[in-house]
Amino acid sequence: MADRLITIANFSEPLEANLAKIKLESAGIKCFLSGENFIATYWLLWLVEGGVKLQVKKSEAERALQILGTKEGQRLEKDREKDLTAETYDLLCPKCHSKNIEYEKFSRKVVFLSILFFRFPLPILKKKYKCGNCGYVWE
C-alpha cells in the first residue's frame, strides 16, 4: 500500500509555499502543493480554503518538518498576527481575561456580501474588538 499524503504546513501566499517546496525537493523529498491554483485565482478566499497546503508522504513527514525548521507545521499568517497583537498591546477580554483578541476593522459579512453581489468589496467600518474564546464584542 502506498504512503498517504499528509499536510505538514499551510501558507497564505503561493510564493511562500513554492519556496518551501523547493527547499524540500532540493533535499530529495517529493512533495505536493494543494490549493495553489485556487488561492492564486481567488486570493480573497484564501482563509476559507485554509491556504496553500504543503503535503508529503507520511513516512517522510518528520524529516520534512526538520528541514523546514517547524514543529507541527506552520500556523496561518492570521494566527501569527493575532498572537503579536495580543502580546504587543496586552489586551485582555473584559469578560474572560483571555489574550485571544481580534480587532475587526471592517464588517466581514458586508464585505463578503458586497463581493458576491457587486464583485467589489464595500468596506463598512466596524472598529470593534472580539474575543476568540468567549465571543464577547466591545469597542
Image: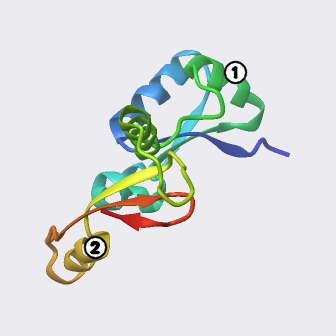
At mark 2, the secondary structure is helix
- Whole-percent x, y for residue 24 in the image: 55, 23
Q: Nearer the viewer, mark 2 or mark 1?
A: 2
Residue under the point 34% across and 35% down: 15
| Location of residue 115 in the rendering, given as x and y in whole percent from the top left corner | 21, 74
Residue furthest out toward the bottom? 117
Q: Identify the disc placed on residue 29.
A: none
- Mark nearer the N terminus (2 vs 1): 1
Q: Residue at x 31, y 51 (%)?
A: 40
Where does the image place residue 32, in percent across and percent down from the top left? Answer: 54, 40
Identity of the residue furthest to the front in this view: 94
Look at the numbered discs 2 and 1 and tell me whether their residues touch, using CB distance below 8 Å. no
Q: Residues within 10 Å of mark 2 (few under 14, many from 20)?
A: some
Crowdedness near tag 1: few (<14), some (14–19) or many (≥20) residues, C-alpha within 10 Å: few
Mark 2 to mark 1 CA distance (whole Å): 40 Å
SS at circle 1:
helix
- Which amino acid, mark 1? Arg
Vertical placement of residue 47 versus 32, above or below: below
From the image, tell me which residue sits under label 1.
63
Camera-nearest residue between 93 and 81: 93
**Residue depicted at 79% across the width and 43% down the height:** 2
- Residue pointed to by mark 2: 112
50 relative to 13, above or below: below
Q: Quadrant of residue 88?
A: top left
- The residue that appears at 15% across and 67% down in the rendered structure is 123
Depth check: 26 or 123 in front? 123
- Looking at the picture, the colour scheme in use is rainbow
| Observer-nearest of 83 and 12 | 83
Q: Is 76 located above or below residue 116 in the figure?
A: above
Quarter that holds the C terminus: bottom left
Amino acid carrying mark 2 in the image: Phe
